[in-house]
Image (cartoon, rainbow, N blue to C red):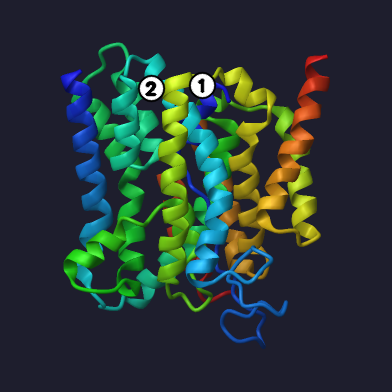
Amino acid sequence: MTAMIVATIALAVINIVFKGAAPALLGTRALPRVVADIVSGFPPALLAGLLAVELLGFQWKAADPTVVPGLAAAAVAWRFRLPDIACVGAAVVVTIPVRLLAVG
Amino acid sequence: MRPSRMSAAAVRLTAMKPSPPPADGPPGDDGDGDDDVGGDHVDSVGWAGGFRIGLGMAAGAFALAISFGAFAVTNGWPAWLAITMSLVVFSGSAQFAIVTAMSGGGALVAGIGAAALINARFIPMSIAVARGLHGGPLQRALEGQGVVDASFVSAQRTDGTLDREKMLGATLVQWPAWILGTAIGAIFAPSTEFMRTYGLDVIFPAFFLVLLLGAIRFSARARIIAGAALVIGIVAVYFLPGGIALLLCGAAATIAAVRTRRST
């Protein structure tokens, strides 16, 4: 129990420092151009990485083909310019029957 | 949601990348008549935009948090401590990592080290947002706590600046959802099969996909970076835990960003 409490406190402190140090220390100073260019590349990289990690999992053990139709539905909904939350809803709605069929 | 996906999944919290506008359009204008900055299809800026996009993120965070709460209790953590961790840490990937590392009497230092490594991605993110925050050092450090994956990406404007209110708004919606989901998961411990049967495990990947489509919609450079990161992520996650695989994706982005800077 003690180790778990220590771990929680330590992780909280580390997180606070990681997120808070740069804003506190850098202030309003502008980033060098090259750094700004690199930073601007993070969002698409992070999203693509999150997608890969989410769908496959460590050692690809979470790979599940039944999510594919749902993701396709989300992409189609996005193509028709539905709000993001509606696209996600479409994915869930399509995934449920697909899995029922897969089980059956 | 199966356990293997739970820990991999943990690394998130949505987003939407600022797509560069058409060549003849002003910053923030993607040509569709609104002033969005990414894949969302409605006006979404400032606090209202943050709250709006935060709702979608919160749905995914809530579902994942249920998994985390159940996962932590199953691995011997008291419910109150799992909930407290979500309250003070609010980082799914790191939380899954530390519970996994310490399960079965695992080493404390190793668990903390793994979680810290996974969360190291917040360092460059906080550097990126620093200029857009307000107040003195203490307030800026406090606002910096609003950096989570999804909020960070969704708050990037097309001109490279930060929509501070949008980032903080999106985070403020997700945080209580994360805590509430953890509490429900820790107390009721729903089965992973329940999460899977009702498609709750598809919420986050669907959201990431939609946001990614928005992010690469108008930018060849973003498409190259996303493609490189996707390939690296697919390969890396076979050998490495999700959080570390994500770090490698960031490294790929760094290389791709520099190499494509002048060519696109």
Mark 2: few/some/many CA within 10 Å (<14, 14-19, 20+) = many
Q: For mark 2, name the chain.
A: B
Residue type at mark 2 is Ala
Q: Nearer the viewer, mark 2 or mark 1?
A: 2
**Quadrant that contains the C terminus of chain B:** bottom right
Q: Position of residue A80 (x, y in %)?
A: 81, 60
Q: Which element type, helix, strand or loop, lies under badge 2?
A: helix
Q: Is residue B247 above or below residue B255?
A: above
Which corner quadrant of the image does residue A25 belong to? bottom left
Q: Amino acid at mark 1?
A: Pro
Q: Chain of mark 1?
A: B
Which disc number belongs to residue B153?
none
Badge 2 is on which residue? B72
Which residue occupies 43% across, 21% down?
Answer: B187
* Horizontal relation, residue B117 to residue A73: left or right: left
Q: Please determine whether, in this image, residue B264 is positioned above or below residue B198.
A: below
Q: Residue at x 76, y 37 (%)?
A: A93
The foreground one among B185 and B90 is B185
Look at the numbered discs 2 and 1 and tell me whether their residues touch, using CB distance below 8 Å.
Answer: no
Residue B138 location, quadrant: bottom left
Taking the image as shown, residue B112 lies to the left or right of residue A86, namely left
Disc 1 target residue: B3
